Amino acid sequence: MNNSLIIGQYVPGDSIVHKLDPRTKITIIFFFVFIVFFANNVAGYGLLTVFALTCMFTSKVPIRFIIKGLTPVWFLIVFTFILHLFVTKEGTVILDFWVFEFYSGGVIQGFAISIRFFLLILVTSLLTLTTTPIEITDAIEDMLHPLKRFKFPVHELALMMSISLRFIPTLMQETDKISKAQASRGVDFRTGPIKERIKAIVPLLVPLFVSAFKRAEELAMAMEARGYQGGEGRSKLRELKIEKRDVFVLILFILVVAGLVLARIYG
Amino acid sequence: MRKKIIEFRNVSFRYGDEGPWVLKNCSFEIYDNEWVAIIGHNGSGKSTIAKLLNGLLFPQEGEIIINGEVVNEESIWNIRKDVGMVFQNPDNQFVGATVQDDVAFGMENRGVPREEMQKRIVETLAAVGMQDYRLTEPHRLSGGQKQRVAIASVLAIAPKVLILDEATAMLDPSGRQEIMQTVASIQGREELSLITITHDLQEVAQADRVIVMNSGEIWKEQVPREIFSQKESLREIGLDVPFVAILADELKRAGVAISIEPLNHEELLEDLWTLHSRT
């Protein structure tokens, strides 16, 4: 069973990107997603690309992991580029081929959109590549903390997330076991018309759900036996701490944003 | 005078108001630093006793006193601090994403400060021999290792009583041995009463005292050696007699003068090789 796939894409390392507080990373990515759509000229895109690539290289994550993360969206990037080539009718005609006319505006537009896509995917996959799911959960719990005032169950949500993460491998192993058990009884998951194959999943899902509920019940009992009584009065083992490097990176990011604004005004 | 840690006073329990009585008028006492094994076949009420001890269930009749406190809705949070419990399924009691998170869970619930937690994690993991796995995820551990982590996370809150509710039932023989050794070494070192609940007679040999349950009633309360000598009646209430006890019986029948009721193979061996010099 492929464990790396189960646990997400986290690649262990001790680069500055790994060590950054997960809250810093999430904040930067949140704003990055917005400002990517703010760029409208070469200088702007250049600045963002340099920022993203710098992050990528300082993270020291091997390129093949990043390429692996990009594969599912590769098609989308190429497709939007081609779509823009055919659909956009701006600028001058640069190529006249049979019934198609390709405009310069289409090429530029296509490039711009593809770069936006590329940057978005690159930066978000950097988050999951350099941050463990638990760190992300902790960060979300901390960042949603103000919502507690509105009776939003922040602690419960975070606990749910971390328990789900912890049980993903367990349930995957279980699925594997059940599918083998059912296959040995003659259920065919791999061949036959699609309708039959979907039907074959039912004897897999039913025992999986039954056991998941049983697990949940036992887990709840074990948690209660260990003194769990909700978020009140709990202490935490893991601690999030804003360090100098977080401040440094945040300032750097603000400079990038400022640069982008300048590029938009004067570019 | 030994200190009474647990007292069952005429406790009866049933699930729902109409159901059959799972426990019928049970009374027993458990003292500090004592190892008591509770044994019985499935449905004899032994696991119900464990849940009653931790306030996961409450008795309909009688009362349970733990460390001087009667178990009820108000006292359960105090009692759960004194009574730690390890359950049967190694996977379904592992809450944390890593070993150290799981050990910390019970302490986090009680608001233990961070430095104290880190210290306790190192200590308790060392006590169960899992110090090298502090950052390991649960799915990379064997069943026996997971149960050792579960024991560590109970020890972390420094309870007065540790209950193992069929904690070895889902393990392979080597995992089972792993747990029994861990438990024996902890019991030797820490100030702790130990209650092991099992249906395997072999696991009661090391206990100080054995409570045998049969259909909701206490059938016998004796030291292991006396229990082992009553093979016929043990079989009658559906318990498997260990091989070594059967062997000793057969040897006696064949005319070999065995002097003791052996609890394990070593004892039988010891008795056999000294046989000649005795006769």
Image (cartoon, rainbow, N blue to C red):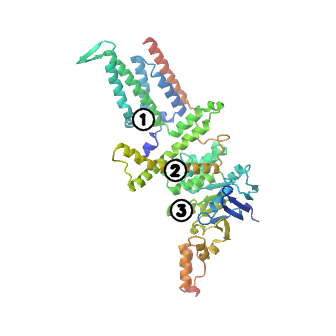
Q: How far apart are labels 1 and 2 at the CA level?
A: 43 Å
Residue at 34 percent of width and 13 percent of height: A90
What residue did someone put label 1 on? A60
Mark drawn on residue A233? none
Q: Is residue B247 above or below residue B183?
A: below
* Mark 3 residue type: Arg
Residue at 37 percent of width and 46 percent of height: A196
Q: In x, y percent, where is residue B1?
A: 77, 66
Q: How far apart are labels 1 and 3 at the CA level?
A: 44 Å
Q: In x, y percent, where is residue B235?
A: 58, 73
Residue at 71 percent of width and 57 percent of height: B59
A229 left or right, relative to A103: right
Q: Are marks 1 and 2 on the same chain?
A: yes
A76 left or right, relative to B59: left
Q: Nearer the viewer, mark 3 or mark 2?
A: 2
Within 10 Å of the Cα at label 1, are there few (<14), some (14-19), or many (20+) other Cα atoms? some
Q: How far apart are labels 3 and 2 at the CA level?
A: 27 Å
* Mark 1 residue type: Lys
Q: Are marks 3 and 2 on the same chain?
A: no
Which is nearer the N-term, disc 1 or disc 2? 1
What residue did someone put label 3 on? B176
Secondary structure type for disc 2: helix
Farthest left residue? A98
Q: Are marks 3 and 2 in contact (CB under 8 Å)?
A: no
Q: In x, y percent, where is residue A216?
A: 56, 48
What residue did someone put label 2 on? A210
Within 10 Å of the Cα at label 2, are there few (<14), some (14-19), or many (20+) other Cα atoms? few
Residue at 58 percent of width and 35 percent of height: A141
Farthest bottom residue? B279
Q: Are marks 1 and 3 in contact (CB under 8 Å)?
A: no
Secondary structure type for disc 3: helix
